Image: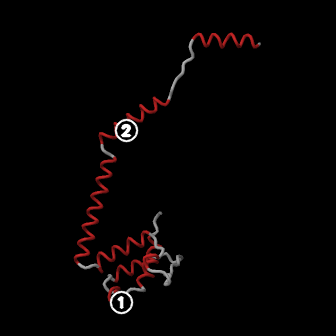
Amino acid sequence: MGNNYHKAYVEVLEILKYIPKEEFDKIPKDMIQTFTEKADNNYQYHIDKTIPFEKQVLLDETKSILAILFRDYWATDFQREQILLKEKLDTAKAEEELSEKYKYDDLFKRKHNMERQTKEMIVYEKEKWYEKFLHFIRKLFKR
């Protein structure tokens, strides 16, 4: 994915052209100026008016910026509370998954299991003395 924020600013500025003026005016001017200054001048983006907005092809970074704009400037108080609550729950869930994945005790158990599996995979078949002797005899007769 990479850092596509400079391209995302272009997409956001293009989308903002289509929102009502009263909604546009809720966004701080310095934020709009930052989008304009940091936008990638070589990147072109146009909205396809023949398809609904939900189906427009947008960068993930653009979606994130629009979500933040909605949360901070366009959402009602109730919507903002719900969004913040969901973000808090998602963050807690992600942290719990990480702590479960990298649990201190389990790290050593996994390492021990991996070592045991590796040892089990390596099978040493030592040739028995009489097999060596037979092999040697066969070699002699082949000459």
Q: Regarding mark 2 in the picture, which secondary structure is present there?
A: helix
Please tell me in which quadrant of the rendered image residue 54 appears: bottom left
Mark nearer the N terminus (1 vs 2): 1
For residue 106, above or below residue 69 = above
Q: Check the image and report above or below for 130 versus 70.
A: above
Q: Which amino acid type is shown beneath numbered disc 2?
A: Arg
Q: Residue at x 29, y 55 (%)?
A: 95
**Total number of numbered labels?**
2
Q: In this view, does 121 lie above or below 107?
A: above
Q: Are marks 1 and 2 in contact (CB under 8 Å)?
A: no
Q: Position of residue 25 (x, y in %)?
A: 33, 87
Residue 26 drawn above or below residue 123? below
Q: In which quarter of the image is the C terminus?
A: top right
Q: Which residue is drawn at 52% across and 23% down?
A: 124
Residue at figure coordinates x 45%, y 82% from the top left: 14
- Number of other residues with Cα within 10 Å of mark 2, as a class: few under 14, some 14 to 19, many 20 or more: few
Question: To which residue does mark 1 refer?
Answer: 21
Q: Identity of the amino acid at label 1?
A: Lys
Q: What residue did someone put label 2 on?
A: 110
Crowding at dot 1, Cα within 10 Å, few <14 / some 14-19 / many 20+, comes out as few
Residue at image x 27%, y 70%?
Answer: 83
Which residue is most to the right? 143
Which of label 1 and label 2 is nearer to you? 2
**Which quarter of the picture shows residue 31?**
bottom left
C-alpha distance separating marks 1 and 2: 58 Å
Q: Which of 70 and 4 is in front in this view?
A: 70
Give the number of the disc on residue 56.
none
- Which x, y percent locates residue 56? 47, 76
